Image (tube, rainbow, N blue to C red):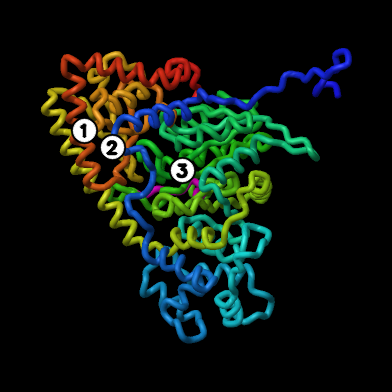
Amino acid sequence: MSGARERAGGGVMACEIPAPQTSFDDLYSAVYAILDDAKTDHDLIKLYKGSHGSPDPHPLVTGFGEFFFRTRRGLVAYACSAVNPHQPPTLADLDAFDADYGPRIQTRAAFDLLARAARRPHERTADFLAYVTGRTHQLGAYRGGSSGYDDEARAFAAAHFRHAGLDTTPSQVLIFCGGAKGAFMAFCAALMCRRRHDDLRHLGGLLLAPAGYYQSLRLIPPVFGGDIHVTSDLTGETVSGWLAETNGHPRRCVYVPLVNNADGRVLTAARARSIAYAVLNHNVAHPASPVYVLADDVYIGSYLIPGCEGLPIATVTGADLGDPELGRMSDWTLSVVTASKTFALPTARIAFATSTNPALLGAVGHYRTVLSQGRVPQVTELTAVAAICLTPQTWIDEWNSRYRTRLAELSTRVNAINATAGFEAFRIQTPDGGWYLPLHVSPTLIPGAASSVDAFAALMHYDGDSHGSGIAMLPGELSGYRACDDGFVLRGTLAASEEDLCRFSGRLRDALAQLTSPEGPGLVQQALKRARMIADVDAILAGCRY
């Protein structure tokens, strides 16, 4: 009983048992607590959300969802029945579907991958097609793997990865519930934990990330004893420098977003190759302490600058760099894609990940099971991969064009506000991709503010207790920004209605008028005081490492 209870005389004295933590003073929790508090008094313009501008994914995707619940059959059956609903399915049906509907990933290519992986020896392709299109998902059944016939979802995901330039097979695809965070969690666990029988040790590790990283990433490495190091500019040079500075640490990885989550910077071919060279060169020289890469490719296809296109880091090989002996990045990378961003299906909460490294896949797969991220509902799994693969590129391009137009119109209105002010109170940093809106706020506008968290609070409470006021964006510190020399950094979004974006610029004008009035300094101090009543902002930021 020692360690649980101690006897004192004839009675029992219970040891003090620690209670669960009831409050959390990390930056992520603080920011959302301050935001929730502001919602109680203000009808905020909510520009902090990350979802796509479309209220629904493409009709091909919702059409598949309806088809699945009506028939309980999969994607190949859906494609065949869309063009040939009354006759036995044929390969020509898949070709016709691809020609008629223009999915960004050809269903015929996905089926061919599935057939190569799952067709039995000597089984005719026509018979295998009949099997795949005829089988039904039993919603009451409980199967291993993910759930249902996940081979079809993995084949379509593999076709997506191959279209992006990765040499992936269906057997190298893992499916996660929990969205990208589910895959990120398993990746960090795979690198930062070691299991020996029933003992699971959290050994920690280091993750290098660019400022502007996906804000929820900051929650993940600490779960396993890890830490995040932030660089203002993720290049081959900074990766090499970081590897030299952290020499001797056995568990290191680099987070490489295809599109930066805060400022929309796209991973160009030149920058991808410079990072790849740093990683591959290090791993050849230090085989006992390799560095791994977490490739966040969720914004693939979302590019705002005409002619600008990202290069997924895992597609780079030593041959591309002039030295085939360096190997390929896919052997050191876990590449992750979801339906939640470019393909407008965030409610799926499904991620697909791949690597050509069997050990990495095995470890990530193990922790997928440990973290219960592998039991995926069949319809969610298939609808998510339908969004990734069936969404036509023309639909994606149309939305990119809409975001470009919204950005141009909003920039014109903000420039007019600055002209009225006589100084650059607000500056929009033009993103290359995604749909986020990096807004720099002049310190002149917010006297007494010391951080972007302060600017975040001031713009929510710029008009005191007025209900019809307030702008909600996310502070840059949440994504690793620290220096405010170029103004306080707030992240908004272009994926809002045109009405809300017009209201946003109107409220920026109102905020400028209020904050530059004689009452302005008092309004700022009131906003900063209110934020500090919710969270100890100064202490949190002083102790913030990433």
Mark 3, residue position? 273
Pointers 1 and 2 in contact (C-beta within 8 Å) = yes
The rendered magenta stretch, by its main secondary structure, is classed as loop
Q: Is residue 119 left or right of residue 220?
A: right
Where's the N terminus, which quadrant?
A: top right
As drawn, the residue found furthest toward the right would be: 10
Residue 398 x/y as whole percent:
28, 57
Q: Nearer the viewer, mark 1 or mark 3?
A: 1
Name the kind of residue labelled 1 in the image: Arg
Is 303 drawn above or below residue 444 in the view shown? below
Residue 66 spot, x, y in % from top left: 45, 68
Q: Is residue 404 left or right of residue 277?
A: left
Residue 527 locus on image (x, y percent): 31, 20
Question: First in sequence: mark 1 or mark 3?
Answer: 3
Label 2 SS: strand
Q: Are marks 1 and 3 in contact (CB under 8 Å)?
A: no
- The magenta segment is 309-316
- In whole angstroms, how far apart are the C-alphas of marks 2 and 3? 40 Å
Give the structural element (helix, strand or loop) at label 1. Answer: helix
| Residue of label 1 | 507
Query: Upstream in the sequence, badge 2 or badge 3?
Result: 2
Residue shown at the point (59%, 44%) measured from the top left: 332
Identity of the residue drawn at 52% across and 50% down: 319
Q: Nearer the viewer, mark 2 or mark 3?
A: 2
Q: CA distance from mark 1 to mark 3?
A: 43 Å
Residue 311 falls inside the magenta stretch: yes
Residue at the spot of label 2:
45
Residue drawn at the location 21% of the way across and 39% of the way down: 503
Task: Decide: few, some or many residues near mark 3? Use Cα within 10 Å; few <14, some 14-19, many ≥20.
Answer: many
Name the kind of residue labelled 2 in the image.
Answer: Ile
Q: Is residue 259 left or right of residue 502?
A: right
